Image: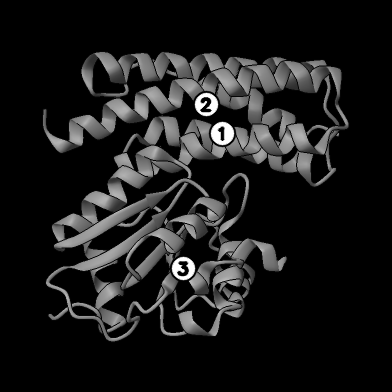
């Protein structure tokens, strides 16, 4: 992965505390090229009282990470133009400071090879599309991010 | 407007955009049949439509898109070569997608049109060599 893709991500953090954070609402980054699916995932998250920042591809996702308050989790699609979800995950995982950031791959690719590739790249969880609100909530709970 | 109807409207708009892209890429692909980049763009456009249908429960449109995706998968794997018959069938698929999107825009439902002949054609082409 080219360093230029992640260049500035750490500097952009400045003195902002990464983990644990103190704020009332959780914050998620959703990286998905389909606006329809992005709207659905964002709606699911808002129903869980989670604030959302959106990006349409991996490169935009890296840009949002530079700009936003460090998120509590990231949902990322696999197949996207410009920069895929796998490349996004690899770019984020190159930076040790983001090691605790939970990355959830949400994709239609269901073969075990794909799951293995995503986990090897640094995803924490893998969700197959289409997913329901309950499935997503369950996965986020598995990460210990939501109180049951 | 409820949140779900806003999502369905977005789906119709995005679906029509992707259908337009699909049509353009398919026409280009007929003239450049060895272009893996064009084939990837065709695949991505159809995949985007299919992905959203599965979330929204539009099962007929999802199944039809899946049949087209399977044919594209055979082309991508090199098991089939692009020819005029395949491009024509895929353009018919684009027309069918537009029809269903039109029905969804008008009624919120997929409608009663049947696409058995198109499905059969797309499936048959997958088995051709």
Q: Going 64% across and 37% down the picture, which residue do you hit?
A: B43
To which residue does mark 2 refer?
B18
The N terminus of chain B, quarter of image: top left
Q: Chain of mark 1?
A: B
Q: Tell me how far mark 2 sits from mark 3, CA to CA.
A: 35 Å
Residue located 71% across and 39% down the image: B40
Give the Cα distance between marks 1 and 3. 37 Å
Q: Which residue is mark 3?
A: A12
Residue B67 in view (yes/no): no
Residue, x 30% and y 39% (percent of image)?
B56
Q: Nearer the viewer, residue A128 or A51?
A: A51
* CA neighbours of label 1 inside 10 A, class few (<14), some (14 to 19), many (20+): many
Q: Is residue A142 above or below residue A69?
A: below
Circle nearer the viewer, 1 or 3 = 3
Quarter of the image for residue B124 reads top right
* Residue A94 image point, x, y percent: 61, 78
């Amino acid at each position: 992965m080219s360093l230029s893709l992640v260049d500035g991500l750490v500097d952009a953090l400045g003195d902002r505390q990464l983990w644990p954070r103190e704020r009332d609402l959780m914050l998620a980054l959703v990286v998905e090229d389909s606006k329809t699916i992005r709207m659905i995932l964002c709606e699911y998250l808002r129903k869980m009282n989670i604030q959302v920042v959106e990006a349409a591809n991996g490169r935009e996702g890296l840009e949002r990470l530079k700009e936003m308050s460090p998120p509590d989790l990231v949902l990322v699609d696999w197949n996207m133009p410009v920069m895929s979800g796998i490349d996004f995950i690899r770019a984020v995982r190159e930076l040790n400071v983001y090691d605790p950031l939970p990355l959830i791959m949400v994709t239609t690719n269901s073969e075990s090879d794909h799951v293995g590739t995503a986990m090897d790249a640094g995803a924490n969880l893998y969700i197959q599309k289409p997913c329901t609100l309950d499935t997503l909530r369950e996965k986020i709970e598995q990460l210990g991010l939501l109180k049951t | 407007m409820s949140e779900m109807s806003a999502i369905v409207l977005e789906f119709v708009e995005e679906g029509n955009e992707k259908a337009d892209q699909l049509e353009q890429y398919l026409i280009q692909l007929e003239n450049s049949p060895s272009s893996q980049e064009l084939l990837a763009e065709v695949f991505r456009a159809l995949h985007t439509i299919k992905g959203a249908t599965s979330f929204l429960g539009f099962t007929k449109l999802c199944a039809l898109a899946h049949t087209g995706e399977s044919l594209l998968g055979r082309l991508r794997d090199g098991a089939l070569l692009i020819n005029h018959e395949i491009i024509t069938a895929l353009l018919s698929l684009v027309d069918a997608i537009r029809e269903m999107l039109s029905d969804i825009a008008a009624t919120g439902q997929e409608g009663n049109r049947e696409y058995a002949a198109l499905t059969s054609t797309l499936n048959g082409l997958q088995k051709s060599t």
